[in-house]
Amino acid sequence: MKQQKQPSFVDALIPITLLVTLLGAAVYLYGDSSSSGPNQIALLFATFTAALIGLKNGYTWKTLEEAMIKGITISLGAIIILLMVGALIGTWLLSGTVPTLIYYGLQVINPSWFYAASCLICGVVAMSIGSSWTTAATIGVALLGVATGLGLDQVVTAGAVISGAYFGDKLSPLSETTNLAPAVAGSDLFDHIQHMLWTTVPSFVIALIIFIFMGFNAEVNSEAGRIDEIVSILQSNFNINIFMLVPLLVLLGLAIRKMPAFPAISIGAVIGAVWAVLFQGELIASQIDRSQGELVGYIKLVWATFFDGFALQTGDAKMDDLLSGGGMSSMLTTTWLVMTALMFGAIMEKTGLLDVFVRSILKIAKSTGSLIASTIATCVGTNLVAADQYIAIVVPGRMFKEEYKKRGLKSVNLSRTLEDGGTITSPLIPWNTCGAYMQSVLLINPFDYAMYAFFNLINPLLAVIYAYLGIKILKITPPEMKVEGSK
């Protein structure tokens, strides 16, 4: 067997440079459509290049292929959730759940504090259920509809939704990433959450203040007449009442009771379909093909909503876009992006190309401040390269864990930093699994909403400032040495 060689810094730089160049070209040439194919091709070319470097360094094709397959396997849980979220959006549009949320939102939310309210609502919901994805796909979609009715900026609204969703997700003990980070770093879950409060809460408060300021200074382009027009369209096409929110309440209840995401979302989608049949009979009757009989027409329409979403024609193009969508098929492009991104990340990790950058970083990270800043930079870089928030937590966590111990730093410093750098920057990158997901449900490119996701931008910067100033950087005391060393 050929001896496997350690890659050089130039080896590691080649696929990264190629990927960045190709992704930049894809955005330049295709704009918002870059995630619908061009980014995937860029990732495949970069994967092939990384594989060639691996072959040069003594890895066999079988080893590299197994790494790629393993990388894709990691994403399968996310993929089945993605597909079911597509079905849920479709059935919740048909059932009137999303239209009802939009209707009531238009009644109670004032434009002057809409952005801040959107951020806060998403934060509370995400903290309750531990899922930024479910929050964005349900509450977030509805809030974008409300923004349309109020004539407010949808891109800013998406930034507020992302900010709130990731704030709540980050502090929720039900969140997968909130459990993963302390598990990797070797810290206690609730110690980890308590330590995160110091960087997370101030960042969120600053974001809310910015959103409040933006709301009071927002130019509302919609007049009361337009809101009345939207309300009229909703009422004329859907049966709107408080009972239409039952699918949402059931989903939230299942999530709070810690039911796994896939069965919970599946149940939510099925209840949405049942609610559509029970309460939206007139709407379904106007949509069905009666050539095979009315019952068959009902079955075909509801069935199609699961796999191909729901389409409504009201005569108002903007409302048609707002009230149409979903279906598993709408998630296929995102699935393609997730798979190609994780193939590239798996090759980079297997061949040691990612490790090259960490070794180089540790040579210059002499102080505690520079170590924490380097950890955050590595998490962000892993999100860019490996394109998945779980990898952006696990890989840097494994690489930096011993260094934190050597420097006498408590493991909660590492676990907090992994979340400050890894969890919340993932939705800002279009080819990252989180960024791709958010674009698929909110229909806004992460490059557009990223500059308004204030919490996600402020939190890593505040963490670096804390690190250099020595604020809430906990040291291991002598009695704790054995405890920390045993984790």
Image (cartoon, helix red, strand yellow):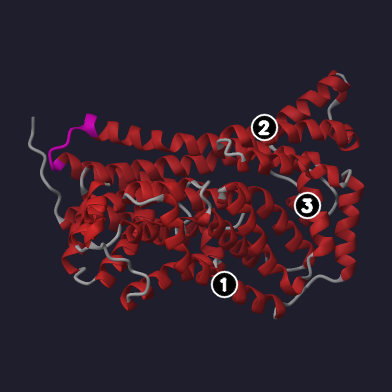
Per the image, label 2 sits on a secondary structure element best described as helix
**Residue 16 position by quadrant:** bottom left
Residue type, mark 2 in image: Ile
Residue 252 locus on image (x, y percent): 67, 44
- Crowd class of label 2 (few under 14; some 14 to 19; many from 20; radius 10 Å): some
CA distance separating discs 1 and 3: 26 Å
- Please state which of the two labelled residues, at mark 1 or mark 3, is closer to the viewer: 1
Is 5 placed left or right of 224 in the picture? left
The answer to if 231 sits in the magenta stretch is: no
Determine the image quadrant of residue 14: bottom left
Q: Say whether disc 1 or disc 2 marks the residue closer to the N-terminus.
A: 1
Work out whether 272 lies above or below 451. above
Q: Say what amino acid the circle numbered 3 marks.
A: Leu
Mark 1: few/some/many CA within 10 Å (<14, 14-19, 20+): few
At 18% from the left edge and 53% from the top edge, which residue is drawn? 11
Q: Secondary structure at mark 1?
A: helix
Observer-nearest residue: 414 or 349? 414
Where 437 falls versus 416 (above or below)?
Answer: above
> Cα distance, mark 1 to mark 2?
35 Å
Q: Is residue 61 left or right of residue 263?
A: left
Q: Give how far apart the Cα atoms at labels 2 and 3 are.
A: 19 Å
Residue identified by numbered label 3: 101
> Which residue appears at 25% of the width and 63% of the height?
477
Note whether 99 is above or below 105 in the view shown.
above
* Lateral position of residue 7 relative to residue 128, left or right: left
Residues at marks 1 and 3 touching, judged by CB atoms closer than 8 Å: no
Please name whichever residue, 87 or 36, is drawn nearer the observer in this view of the structure: 87
Q: Which residue is mark 2?
A: 267
- Which residue is disc 1 drawn over? 205
SS class of the residue under badge 3?
helix
Q: Which residues are magenta?
A: 56-63
